Image (tube, rainbow, N blue to C red):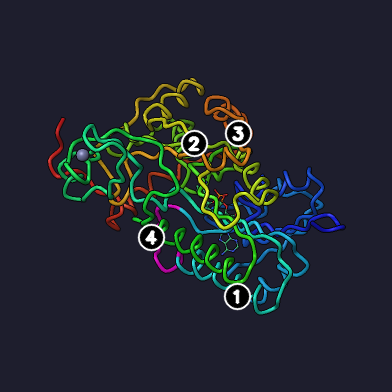
Amino acid sequence: MTSHPTRALVTGGAGLIGSHVADLLQREGWIVRVLDNLEPQTHRRGKPAWIAKDVEFIQGDVRDRQTMTSALQGIDVVFHQAAYGGYMPEIAKYVHVNSFGTAQMLEVIRERRLSIQKIVVASSQAVYSEGAATCPEHGLVFPEVRPVEQLQAGDWSVHCPICQAVTKSAPTPERAPVGGETVYGLTKVDQEKLTLLWGKQIGIPTVALRYSCTYGPRQSIFNPYTGVIAIFCTRLLNNLPPVLYEDGEQTRDFSFVEDIARANLLAAETDQLDGLPVNVGSGRGVSIRDVAEHISEALGIHIAPEVKGEFRPGEMRHLTSGTDRIRAAGYKPQVELEAGIGRYLDWIRQQSDIRDYFSEAANVLRSKGIVHRVKVADE
Ligand SMILES: NC(=O)c1ccc[n+]([C@@H]2O[C@H](COP(=O)([O-])OP(=O)(O)OC[C@H]3O[C@@H](n4cnc5c(N)ncnc54)[C@H](O)[C@@H]3O)[C@@H](O)[C@H]2O)c1
Ligand SMILES: [Zn+2]
């Protein structure tokens, strides 16, 4: 690419994924600048110690045009990780940080004719409405989000959009319809579409990585809205039961954060993924109940999960990433869920004052209508 070492801007580089991307790039000989506002929800104790000394750290907001402009100076590759995330009651803030922040970044790059060679944007599996499924009659189908009335009646299953039969979960390929059934999901759709579309118009290669549920050391132990593994760990360490929504049999695909960092490096270095949305996941679906049980086992804290028939409208039932596209480009996840949870627990044990922020947050979500409960509980 260039004769000098490649210079990266990692927005959100103090966070879970961004900080691991920054570390990996540095090990690879890149020069790294981080732009992060240290969002208080995520960083209750200020600037985390894990930000490497030789990283150029800019504390600032992606929404601030001036800050973004100077952060982009002299950069070759942007890893745009900064985002507001979780099941938060705020609507405007998601749109402002995620959608507007991304749009403004792109505008600055074009206006200043910056010689950016690639932009890798953090998208999410949350762009899908519901995971792909197979119907006994119709084969692979792409169901829509389950209607609230169905969930209120305690029917958690995913029905075939053609014949209404109960379906089985299948890996979701990138060609599945993109929806955005939560405000967060909607802004992730914005971020990836803005970036991919703009990149094609302007001639800058871009890649949108649709991460699966990502976990690992440095995942905020303060944010009660994101990261089911972090939330279950902090609940159990406070001798409280993990709370399972629906019946706990919903499944997710989990990625260890270092694998996600490797996917970012790959997306920057190969041109095979340019212009595309790309799933990054393990390709394995695990039920939330199994995750809770595994953590409980690993911690040696045996408290049965709480299942009260609560659900979050807009949430998908099953999502396993179809990973053919990224695997064809050479990606192979290296850390299995069990080993990765072990690594996370080693880290969390070294953290002091692990408080439960979830109980209070759950009450807020209930009162704001983000968490619902079945109308007639069927025991
Ligand atoms: N963790 C997951 O499971 C997951 C899954 C899919 C997609 N993603 C996406 O990956 C990216 C990184 O997520 P993460 O898990 O590392 O979250 P994180 O909260 O650990 O990191 C996000 C970082 O962005 C910073 N940030 C937030 N708002 C900002 C703003 N206005 N200006 C500057 N910095 C700001 C935060 O301070 C934080 O350090 C996000 O775009 C997220 O939507 C994460
Ligand atoms: Zn069918």
Q: Indicate the secondary structure of the residue bearing disc 4.
A: helix
Q: Are marks 1 and 3 in contact (CB under 8 Å)?
A: no
Marks 2 and 4 sit apart, C-alpha to C-alpha, by: 22 Å
317 w.r.t. 18: above or below: above
**Span shown in magenta:** 86-94
Disc 1 C-beta below 8 A from ligand 1? no
Question: Which quadrant would residue 208 be assigned to in this image?
Answer: bottom right
Which residue bears the numbered disc 1?
A: 107
Which residue is label 4 attached to? Answer: 183
Alpha-carbon distance for marks 3 and 2?
Answer: 14 Å
Neighbourhood count class around disc 4 (C-alpha, 10 Å): few under 14, some 14–19, many 20 upward: many
Of residues 260 and 132, which is closer to you in this image?
A: 132
- The type of residue carrying mark 3 is Lys
Of callouts 1 and 4, the N-terminal one: 1
Find disc 2 in the rendering and name its residue.
254
The tag earlier along the polypeptide, 4 or 3, is 4
* Residue 148 counted in the magenta span: no
* Element at label 1: helix
Mark 2–mark 4 CB contact (< 8 Å): no
Residue at 62% x, 29% y is 346
Q: Is residue 57 above or below residue 203?
A: above
Please state which of the two labelled residues, at mark 3 or mark 2, is closer to the viewer: 3
Q: Who's the residue at 48% across and 34% down the image?
A: 283
Percent across and percent down for residue 116 are 71, 65
- Mark found first going from the N terminus, 2 or 1: 1
Task: Name which of mark 1 and mark 3 comes first in the sequence.
Answer: 1
Lower position in the chain sequence, tag 3 or tag 2: 2
Q: Residues within 10 Å of mark 2 (few under 14, many from 20)?
A: many
Q: In the drawing, does residue 171 fall left or right of residue 275?
A: left
Q: Nearer the viewer, residue 328 or 227?
A: 328
